[in-house]
Image (cartoon, rainbow, N blue to C red):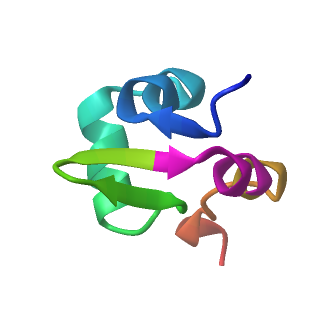
Amino acid sequence: MEKEVFTIRSLASLLEMSEQTAYKLAREGAIPGRIKVGRSVRFNKKIVLDWLQQGGAKDDSQN
């Protein structure tokens, strides 16, 4: 059975960024699907993949 969540490590790897950057962006609300599990953070895989399909974070400099 495939996991339905990303860990911060797997999310950072997917996005090709450091774990610290991924965590910071998620905490700021730039990455959707954040789920707190006790002191750990997970990300709903479907929400993250849908977000990426729609282009991910929008670049404010393009407005």
In the image, residue 59 above or below residue 39: below
33 with respect to 8 (left or right): right
30 with respect to 59 (left or right): left
The residue lying at 73 percent from left, 46 percent from top is: 49
In the image, residue 40 above or below residue 62: above
Q: Position of residue 31 (x, y in %)?
A: 50, 57
Q: Is residue 6 magenta?
A: no
Q: Residue 63 sits in which quadrant?
A: bottom right
Residue furthest left in the image? 39
Q: Position of residue 26 (x, y in %)?
A: 38, 56
Quarter of the figure that contains the N terminus: top right
The residue lying at 50 percent from left, 20 percent from top is: 13
Q: Nearer the viewer, residue 54 or 47?
A: 47
Q: Magenta part of the protein: which range?
A: 43-50
Residue furthest front in the image? 1
Q: Position of residue 36 (x, y in %)?
A: 31, 58
Q: Residue 51 sits in which quadrant?
A: bottom right
Q: Main secondary structure of the magenta part?
A: helix
